[in-house]
Image (spheres, helix red, strand yellow):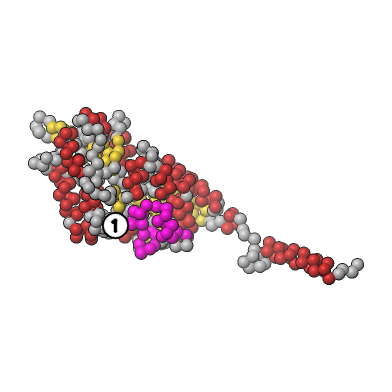
Amino acid sequence: MQINKVQFIIISGVVGITLLFFLILKGFLPGLQKENTAAENAVEGTLTIWGMFDDEDAYRTAIEGFKGVHPKLRIAYRKFTDEARYEMELLEALAVRRGPDIFMIPSRGLDRNKEKIAFAPQSRMSLLSLRRLFPRVVEEDFVDRGNIGALPLSIDTLVLIYNRNLLNQAGIILPPATWEDLVILVPRLVKKDDTGAIAQAGIALGGSGETVARAADIVGLLALQNAAASGSSLESIIRSGAGTQALDFYKKFGVAESPAYTWSDTMPYSLDAFGTGRAAMILGYSSDLKNISARNSFIEPTIAKAPQKQGSENPVALSRYWGYAVSNGSPMPDIAWQFIIMMTTNEGIARSYASVTGRPPALNALIAENLNNPKMSVFAEQALFARSVRVPDE
């Protein structure tokens, strides 16, 4: 049977299309082969992660989600609870090229760690994306010359922790909102024994770091607030005299001749003093709340925003937290950054982490969710105006 020109064209087209699909399916045409499944493209090997404080369960959702994309990849997590030991073992492991692929660095530690890390590929996480996803302090802490060195899951800030019962007994309904209010309220909360020694402190301030938890951070917060107009760099704080002013103000709470006298280094450690009702207020982080509860389950600490300078229009909070970085010795830096970015920017994964650990979130979206949460609202709000000072060595 003869075929006409139109039939020939149709048959030729069908044969050509069939042959094209055959070549694509068999992978003979570069750039046109069928996209492999996740299992076929999956990376093999072990991705090692070193973390501080949290059990592996805190990362379960992140690990399972990532293994769904890379089912042949093994993820090994190691937990540390002692910062000094962690720093020592990390340095030793990285020195012999046996360190983890992913490790944690403190929010003030980028400068002393940037020679050890591989910065994030800008194709995976841009500075613009970081600014959209996280509060400003993350850029201050973890960005160097436009390059992202680490990303956080949580942002903790220094807050005022107070014993409502002790304040109410002194006729105080609300905690002090300013440092000037604090100076006025302290004498109403101080109780002395028969020898004139402090029996109950209004607030744990004025003592050394051996008796006052977070003493250095409290002075740092005061310095940042004093230097708010001149910037938050260590150099600007020193030049402005803000640090000296902060230290002088802090010390007067521990001077017997001062009207604000409220603390002596003969007092128990501040967390213990608060837990036993011997201190009406302290300044601390969310992690300190757990320590207080562990000391005395009958004390119900209440939190408020850290005091501000009277008349200040721009509040300043002090942050302290950890970020996840990739070792520059990792054999799979791109995969490691994929994991960090997925873990820290995926709302579901970040929400799961916050739920398991009870830590304040870092993502702007989750911060917004917690602004009306009684337990988290103070931390959420302060994260938005938190500041930090990067130092070479604390």
Task: Identify residue for label 1.
Answer: 390
The residue under the point 71% across, 65% down is 20
Magenta stretch encompasses residue 244: no
- Judged from the image, the secondary structure of the residue bearing numbered disc 1 is loop
Q: Looking at the picture, tell me which residue is in the foreground, 386 or 299.
A: 386
The residue under the point 45% across, 59% down is 125
Q: Position of residue 239 (x, y in %)?
A: 19, 60
Q: Looking at the picture, tell me which residue is in the foreground, 391 or 328.
A: 391
376 left or right of 313 in image: right
Q: Looking at the picture, tell me which residue is in the foreground, 368 or 349.
A: 368
The residue under the point 29% across, 40% down is 304
In which quadrant is the C terminus drawn?
A: bottom left
- Residue 324 seen in the figure: no
Query: Which segment is the magenta one?
Result: 124-149
44 left or right of 205 in image: right
Q: Toward which corner of the image does residue 98 lie, by quadrant?
A: bottom left
Magenta stretch encompasses residue 141: yes
Q: Position of residue 296 (x, y in %)?
A: 29, 32
Q: Position of residue 61 (x, y in %)?
A: 48, 45
